[in-house]
Amino acid sequence: MDASTRQRIDALISASPVMVFMKGNKLMPQCGFSNNVVQILQSLGVPFETFDVLSDMEIRQGIKEFSDWPTIPQVYVKGEFLGGSDILIEMYNSGELREKLEVALAS
């Protein structure tokens, strides 16, 4: 990944306490996994921003290298990579996600 793509990804992650790189956006997810993440975050009442990786192939590929995670969606909380759809579902079901978000967003 080139330096400008890395800088763009850093800027996107820094733009919001909760950032989701996904297919589509929170109003119109373009895949089931992205929709799962949107539904979970909305059910928790957490404000979050999204970036549609379908609109930018450099970011779409770059975010996979950036996080060393091969799939989309990807969720970042306060700059930290949290995981994708499966991890968020597990964390949501255990209550860990709500707790982590409350702590992160309170600071």
Image: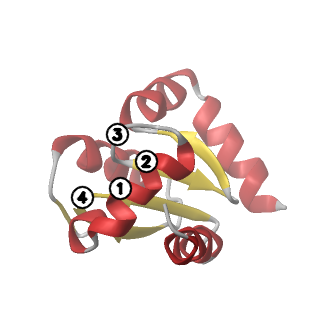
Image quadrant where residue 12 sits: bottom right
Residue 23: numbered disc: 4
Q: CA distance from mark 1 to mark 4?
A: 12 Å
| Residue found 54% across the figure and 78% down from its top | 4
Seen in the picture, residue 20 relative to 64 is either above or below; the reply is: below
- Measured in 3D between alpha carbons, the distance from the residue under mark 4 to the one under mark 3, in whole angstroms, is 11 Å
* Contact, mark 2 vs mark 1 (Cβ under 8 Å): yes
Residue beneath the point at 24% across and 49% down: 35
Q: What kind of residue is marked 4?
A: Lys
Identify the residue position indicated by label 3 in the image.
Answer: 71
Residue 61 marker: 1
Residue 26 appearing in the image: no
Residue 95 percent location from the top left of the image: 59, 28
Q: Residue type at mark 3? A: Thr
Give the number of the disc on residue 64: 2
- Circle 3 — which element? loop
- What's the CA distance linking mark 3 and mark 2? 7 Å
- Check residue 19 in the rendering and tell me which mark sits there, or answer none: none
Say if residue 72 shows up in the picture.
yes
Q: Are marks 1 and 3 in contact (CB under 8 Å)?
A: no
